[in-house]
Image (cartoon, rainbow, N blue to C red):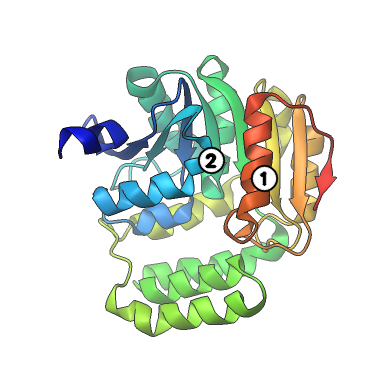
Amino acid sequence: MGATLTKRFDTGQFDGRYPYVRVGHGPETLLVIPGIGDAMFDGAYGRTDAVTTAATFRRFLADYTVYLVSRPRGLKDRQSIGAMARDYERVLADHVGAASVLGLSMGGLIGQELARERPDLIDRLVLGVSGCRLAESGRPLVRELHRLALEGEWTEIRARLYEAMFTGAWRRAVPLLSRTVGRVHPPNPADPRDVPISFEAVRDYDGTDRLADLESRTLVIGGTDDPFFPEGILRETYEGLPDGQLAMFSGARHGAFLERKAGFDDWVERFLRGEAATRVRQ
């Protein structure tokens, strides 16, 4: 990697176990904890991944150094959300330092446990399309995704997740492309066992009775029609927090952070800057 590119981004593995991408050189630090799709990742970030990460988080790069950090490949000895959170505790304590945390989907569950156990390492916490528990209405889909994971149906899992994420024409087009053109480049999990383990961890997590223990100021943000974390779960999560904010996008599903990206990024940016907000529906 040339000197100029090194200044723009960095990729590698912390402790030889935690794949990461670093983009930006802002004075503050933002740790991004990815969702369940991380389990279907091959475990090696390259230049293209770094460019994509920089584009995704470009709104934050002036103020933040952004670290997208994956979980280790091979989760058989860390099958709970709490165990996964301890991995991120090590990343913060040994490599990144105190940071604000953006947890997306499953990453938001991990972020809750991380903030609960190590509030000294967390500035602000964003639960993006995530909540204190999986909605009952989302459990049948998670069971089906878990079954597909046991059968190694990676392309179909990706397509089903896209169906859960998008609305309108995108909800029809993106899964179709994934099942057809996308078969040329299917997901390639480094350890296939990580995929069912991840679905099990999401299924079994319930942090409802521990929300009051979260000391970090927390933003709950997502779509009202998310099949996994719908409006009821978003409100339940917000109402249990001692210091929380809530933003919801009407009609949006699990991909609110993509379909409503401008609004989503705006709310996250304002929250991280410390601007006060009340409960908001857009």
**Farthest residue in the top direction?**
120
Residue 122 % position (x, y)? 54, 22
Q: Residue at x 64, y 57 (%)?
A: 256
Residue 251 % position (x, y)? 76, 64
Q: Residue at x 59, y 34 (%)?
A: 112
Q: Is residue 207 above or below residue 185?
A: above
Local crowd size for mark 1, using a 10 Å CA cut-off: few (<14), some (14–19), many (≥20): many
Residue 59 % position (x, y)? 53, 40
Disc 2 residue type?
Arg
Q: The N terminus is located in which quarter?
A: top left
Q: Residue at x 39, y 18 (%)?
A: 93
The reply to whether residue 174 is in sight is yes
Element marked by disc 2: helix
Disc 1 residue type?
Gly
**Mark 2 or mark 1, which is nearer the start of the sequence?**
2
The reply to whether residue 130 is in sight is no
Instruction: Point out which mark residue 59 bears.
Output: 2
- Kindly report which numbered mark, 1 or 2, lies closer to the viewer in this rendering: 2
The residues tagged by marks 1 and 2 sit, at their Cα atoms, a distance apart of 24 Å
Would residue 236 appear left or right of 164 to someone viewing this image?
right
Q: Residue at x 84, y 40 (%)?
A: 279
C-beta proximity under 8 Å, tags 1 and 2: no
**Residue annotated with mark 1:** 131
Instruction: Point out which mark residue 202 bears.
Output: none
Q: Is residue 166 above or below residue 3?
A: below
Q: Is residue 53 above or below residue 122?
A: below
Image-quadrant location for residue 72? top left
Residue 274 % position (x, y)? 69, 24
Element marked by disc 1: loop
